[in-house]
Amino acid sequence: MVSAGLDTVPGNLIMGIAYLSSAHGQQIQQRAREAIKAAYPNNDAWTRCLSEEKVPYVTAFVKEVLRFFTVIPICLPRQSIKPITLSTGVTIPAGTSFYMNAWAADMDDTHFKEPHLFVVERYMSGDVLGGDESGNALEGTPHYSYGAGSRMCAGSHLANRELFTAFLRIFLAFDVTESEDPKDRPILDALECNALPTSLTLDPKPFKCGFKVRDRAQLDRWIQEGDKRTADS
């Protein structure tokens, strides 16, 4: 379960950082820090995030990263165990292989309002999945980065916690900034950013961005405390 995540979690983490380096990403970072400060007025989010998840804005950001940058665009195949008759009258025989286009599902405008826009707030209101033409909230899967159904990713909860912790700490420790040279900036199109379009998982194309330490003394303390906690690991 852990080794499988070595091909997927990094893709989402890297592309999340890529988006944070953009102009819109600067706004997201500011809002995230405000949300963290509100949830942890005693400035203890760095350690408490290891055992709890109580910053909804960061959780929503993780979900939008997972949706927007679908790490496995075409899910692993499944095989039908019995004949399936569609509403059109066509019968798909048992033993047929199915592939779910997870990227297309995550970009379905009947399920997500303005799916080609990166919108953290879509997971912050009752209108979670976008809503229909009458403004009624839609129900269903928040994203398909882990697949769907009984055979979806077994490590989804672990991946969610890893991404939440990593991004929360990035928000606390750094200002992620855009490269001064436009040619070094990341490609933020969910398909064009993939260096290997025919691969199973997302492999981001190289890019450059900046990590400006927000408080060097505080960051050094956090690192030292972490070294002590893990000395016997």
Image (spheres, rainbow, N blue to C red):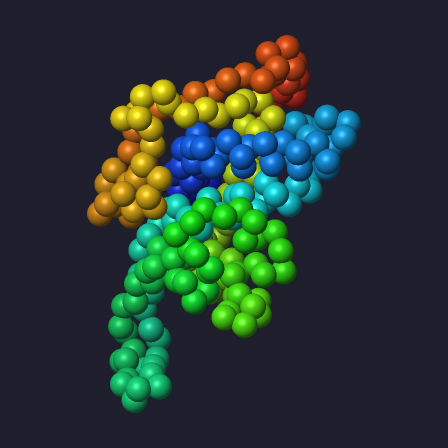
Q: Residue at x 47, y 60 (%)?
A: 113
Outermost residue toward the right in this view: 42
Left or right of 38 in this view: 63: left
Q: Is residue 13 left or right of residue 233?
A: left
Q: Quadrant of residue 41?
A: top right
Q: Nearer the viewer, residue 5 or 86?
A: 86
Quadrant hosting residue 11: top left
Q: Position of residue 30 (x, y in %)?
A: 59, 32
Which sits in the foreground, 135 or 216? 135
User: Is 213 located above or below residue 12 in the figure?
Assistant: above
Establish if 22 lies above or below 106.
above
Q: Quadrant of the C terminus?
A: top right
From the top left corner, tell me how far across and down residue 175 is, in percent.
52, 23
Q: Position of residue 100 (x, y in %)?
A: 34, 62
Q: 228 and 149: which one is in front? A: 149
Question: Which residue is located at x 35 percent, y 39 percent?
Answer: 188
Q: Position of residue 206 (x, y in %)?
A: 30, 29
Which residue corresponds to the image point at 65% horizontal and 21% vertical from the top-left? 229
Asked whether residue 85 appears in the rendered view, the answer is no
Q: Is residue 108 visible?
A: yes
Q: Is residue 166 above or below residue 70?
A: above
